[in-house]
Amino acid sequence: MPRLSAEALKQRIAALQKQLVAAENKKQPAINKVKALMKKLGVSLQDLAGGAAPVTVASKGRRGRPRKADSAIGTKKASRKVAIKYRDDKGNSWTGRGKTPRWLVEAEKSGKNRSDFLI
């Protein structure tokens, strides 16, 4: 690749920055359309992420009988999904369990009340 002068590089950077701004400007209207359609249809981000647990069939032992419960044979139980308790307008969510997420801590520091985010 031939070496470019500093001035040529600056011009190339400026052109690429203009292309970036144009691409960003095209993206936002598309995002707004998708959000409006999701709201109209009642679709959430959790729906898109595959929020429903897959249906499984109970396995059987060697003799064709259902196996004992997982806890009876010493394996870890499958964890249950916990309902979301808090959500903000940006799509961030929290179940109310564990450490408080950063987005909620920052919102509380800015003067908002936790109850404002209750679902």
Image: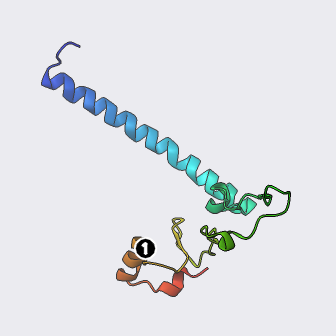
Q: Position of residue 5 (x, y in %)?
A: 14, 20
Crowd tier of the residue under label 1, counting other residues whose Cα lies within 10 Å: few below 14, some 14–19, many 20 or above: few
User: Which residue appears at 55% of the width and 76% of the height?
Assistant: 95
SS class, disc 1: loop
Q: Is residue 71 above or below residue 9?
A: below
Residue extending furthest toward the front: 63
Q: Quadrant of residue 49?
A: bottom right
Q: Position of residue 78 (x, y in %)?
A: 63, 68
So how many labels did they put on this image? 1
Q: Is residue 101 left or right of residue 45?
A: left
Q: Position of residue 84 (x, y in %)?
A: 60, 75
User: Which residue appears at 63% of the width and 62% of the height?
Assistant: 46
- Front residue of 95/8: it is 95
- Front residue of 33/1: it is 1
Q: Quadrant of residue 41?
A: bottom right
Q: Quadrant of residue 70?
A: bottom right
- Front residue of 22/87: it is 87
Residue under label 1, please give it.
101
- Front residue of 69/116: it is 69
Q: Is residue 9 left or right of residue 118?
A: left
Q: Is residue 3 left or right of residue 64?
A: left
**Quarter of the figure that contains the N terminus:** top left
